[in-house]
Each structure stands twice: as structure tokens, then as C-alpha cells.
Amino acid sequence: MNLEYSPLGDQAVIIQIGHAINELTHKRVQQITLILENSQFDWFIEYVPAFTTVTVFYDPVKVSELSSDSSILPYDWVCKELSSLLTNLRDTESVQARTVEIPVCYEEEFAPDLEFVAQTNNLHPEEVIDIHSKGQYLVYMIGFAPGFPYIGGMDEQIAAPRRENPRERIPEGSVGIAGNQTGVYPIETPGGWQLIGRTPLELFRPQDTPPSLLNAGDRIKFIPISKADYEKYKEGEHD
């Protein structure tokens, strides 16, 4: 596996795993984050996984204390440590994934852009719902807002451009489409994705550890529900 290293300022290293957003690159990102999670370094601060990279933040003062050669820059020293740690990484190594079911109510009051997505693709709204809820999805990364999942694998039959004028407030739980991606807004926030439904699940749970219901690597299954079931979920009465 060819990994490329580059600096991000004077306290971070970007590990470039691939250059295309796909499941193989995602698998390698997951493998590296798992290794970092299970490793302990005095110089380590945190890591940030993304679509094709993992960025490792380090303490340059600690690195200078640990290095036996003062002529070596902290960045070069960390790159050498990471290279040694990841040298035996193999594509055959697997990362266990879980499947999370996300109930979604696609009724009109929660889906102001469903008709637009249907018209854009010459489909009936019911066909959009059927395609969206039967998709095979993967959470590639968490970002933009706390707990916001970037979910790949959506069928291009229901792809749609972002709104020309983003909304100032998108309700928590709204399910959207942007290009060939789908996602769920975990908190109320501005946004430009086309909204096709809403889930009653709380994706951002600041009282929990970790605070995000979803994690990179999770498989997602969207389950259509009625408005009555949506209300039951919200009231905590659903099984």
C-alpha cells in the first residue's frame, strides 16, 4: 500500500491514502485509524479521518524531547514513526462494520424538495422514495456539523444538484440529497441539500460517548415510516 506524507503547518502530517472516493480507499482509512486508535504515543494529539486522508496532529515539543538527533525536524521524525507503524498494512486486513437502520418519514411536510428531485430525474416521487430506501449505503466520514454523516452509495437515478439558494434553517433529522450523495442533518443548521424526508432519530447525542450515533464505516439502511410512526419515535413509544 503506497502512502504519501505531507505537512499541514508545523504540527500535523497528512497521510494520503488514495486519490479517489471509493470503498477501497475508505477501507484503508479505517484500517489506519484503527491502528492509531490502538497505539499510544507521547507525541500524539489526535487524528482526523476524511474521504482519502488521515491527518495526524502531534506535539513538536514532545517530539524534540524524544528524538535522539536534534538535526531531524519534528515533521520528519513523525513521518518516520508513522511509516514504521503502517509499513505492514495489508489490503486483506478487514475492519468490522455495523449496520444502522435509519427510519425516515418521506411525507410531504418533511420532504419539501421530493417533487423537485423526482422532476429532475423524470420520476414519480414514490419512485424516488423506493430507490432511496432500497439503497446500499456507507458512511465515509463525519463532518460539516456535529454528527453529520457523509453517506455514499446513492443511486444516480435520484441524484440532484444543491439548491441555488440554501435555506437558513434546516430542521434536525432532515434527510437530504446533494449530487450523488445523501445525508442527514443531525442538528438545526443552514444548508443547501434537497430535502426528501426526516428521521426521528437523534444523530447527535452530546450526553453520550461518543456523541455521534453514526461513525465512519457504518452501513446504513433507510426504513420508510408513516407520520404516525414518526410521532411515536419522537415520543419514545416505538419499539
Image (cartoon, helix red, strand yellow):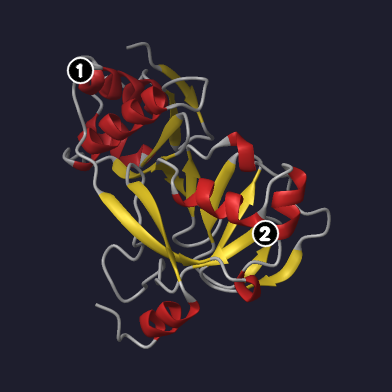
Horizontal and vertical percent position of residue 101: 33, 58
Would residue 69 be found to the left or right of residue 147 on screen?
Answer: left
Q: Which residue is mark 1?
A: 92
**Residue 175, numbered label:** none
The circle on residue 114 is: 2
Q: Residue at x 46, y 74 (%)?
A: 226
Residue 3 higher or lower than 193, as above or below: above
Most extreme residue toward the top is 2
Q: Amino acid at mark 2?
A: Leu
Q: Looking at this view, is 88 or 168 the one in front?
A: 168
For the N terminus, the image quarter is top left
> Can I make out residue 84 in this image?
yes
Total label count? 2
Question: In the displayed image of the protein, which residue is found farthest to the right?
Answer: 164
Helix, strand or loop under label 2: helix
Compared with 52, 89 (above or below) is: above
Between disc 1 and disc 2, whose residue precedes?
Answer: 1
Q: Quadrant of the C terminus?
A: bottom left
